[in-house]
């Protein structure tokens, strides 16, 4: 579930005097709707904020322990590129609350992660007085600070804002954004070959798709393979995201836009 919800990072920003919040529903082919999310993007001068909030619904909520996630990318814009200064991940369920805050030092080219995890665990002990096993719930708190073994100026959210610039002169690029997963991995971003675009368009439910970008976390062996397809409308916004069964063995994942609203930029920068 967590991997699917991370796909909400694939969004195109609509800039102006107001911040734009876009709502999506998440579906798996064999289960229907499994979650919802809202994504907010705002710019102020050379600063940007990007906020993703999601939660599981229905059976997925029961299985995941009512999982909720919040991702915040804060940074600046330089030469048309979105450069991350801090990236925050907050994840909660019925038993665990975890935060991971990444701080970027672009001069030293380092990224430091500050982790704080509070987990409810059940411990079983033997009570000699009653001669019975007794279960007791306790809180385990773990804090950890580490410098990542690689540097990147982008996180899992800001990298998507940079897709137009990254593909300006290349048809496919390899990049390793911070915070894509607990085990950091590479991402491959590219434009599908023109010969397979008509077939890929049939993958989408939304008829407004005009442009496709492909994202993968593995090296492709065949041109018709893909991991994630992002469908853009004529205005440059994302209307739908589709993931192949290679990502989810229980079926295709699909993320569809269901609404959009405006908020004050000042409000977003104050969060």
Image (cartoon, rainbow, N blue to C red):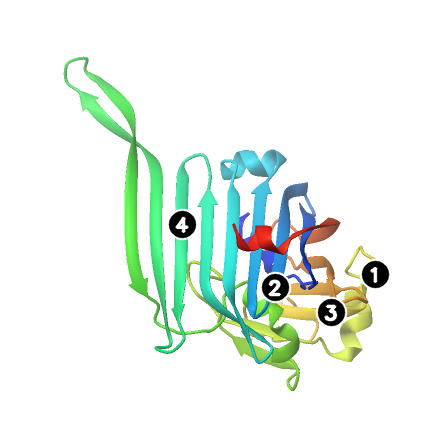
Query: Who is closer to the viewer here, 203 or 12?
Result: 12
Q: Disc 3 or 4, which lies upstream in sequence? A: 4
What SS does tag 4 mark?
strand
- The residue beneath circle 2 is 43
Alpha-carbon distance for marks 1 and 3?
Answer: 11 Å
Q: Position of residue 221 (x, y in %)?
A: 61, 76
Query: Who is closer to the viewer here, 229 or 144?
Result: 144
Alpha-carbon distance for marks 4 and 1?
Answer: 37 Å
Instruction: Please tell me whether mark 3 or mark 4 is closer to you in this view.
Output: 4
Q: Disc 4 or 1, which lies upstream in sequence? A: 4
- The residue beneath circle 4 is 99
Q: Position of residue 268 (x, y in %)?
A: 58, 53
Q: Which residue extends farthest right?
A: 207
The structure residue drawn at horizontal position 75% and vertical position 65%, both measured from the top left corner, is 232
Q: Position of residue 204 (x, y in %)?
A: 78, 59
- The residue beneath circle 1 is 208
Q: Disc 2 or 1, which lies upstream in sequence? A: 2
Q: Is residue 185 above or below residue 271?
A: below
The structure residue drawn at horizontal position 57% and vertical position 80%, both measured from the top left corner, is 79
The part of the image, by quadrant, that contains residue 127 is top left
């Amino acid at each position: 579930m967590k991997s699917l919800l991370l796909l909400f990072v694939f969004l195109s920003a609509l800039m102006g005097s107001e911040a734009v919040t876009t709502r999506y529903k998440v579906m798996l082919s064999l289960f229907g709707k499994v979650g919802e999310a809202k994504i907010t993007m705002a710019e102020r001068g050379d600063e940007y904020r990007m906020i993703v909030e999601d939660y599981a619904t229905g059976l997925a909520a029961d299985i995941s322990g009512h999982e909720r996630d919040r991702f915040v990318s804060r940074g600046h814009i330089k030469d048309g590129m979105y450069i991350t200064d801090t990236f925050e991940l907050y994840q909660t369920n019925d038993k665990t609350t975890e935060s991971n805050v990444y701080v970027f030092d672009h001069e030293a080219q380092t990224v430091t992660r500050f982790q704080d995890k509070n987990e409810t665990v059940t411990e079983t002990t033997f009570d000699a007085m009653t001669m019975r096993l007794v279960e007791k719930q306790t809180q385990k708190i773990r804090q950890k600070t580490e410098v990542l073994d690689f540097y990147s100026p982008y996180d899992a959210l800001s990298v998507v804002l940079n897709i137009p610039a990254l593909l300006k002169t290349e048809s496919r690029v390899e990049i390793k954004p911070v915070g894509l997963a607990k085990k950091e991995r590479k991402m491959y971003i590219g434009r599908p070959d023109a010969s397979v675009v008509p077939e890929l368009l049939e993958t989408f439910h939304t008829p407004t798709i005009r442009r496709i970008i492909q994202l993968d976390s593995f090296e492709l062996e065949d041109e018709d393979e893909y991991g994630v397809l992002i469908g853009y409308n004529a205005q440059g916004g994302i209307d739908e995201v589709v993931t192949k069964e290679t990502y989810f063995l229980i079926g295709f994942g699909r993320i569809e836009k269901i609404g959009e609203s405006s908020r004050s930029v000042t409000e977003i920068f104050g969060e």
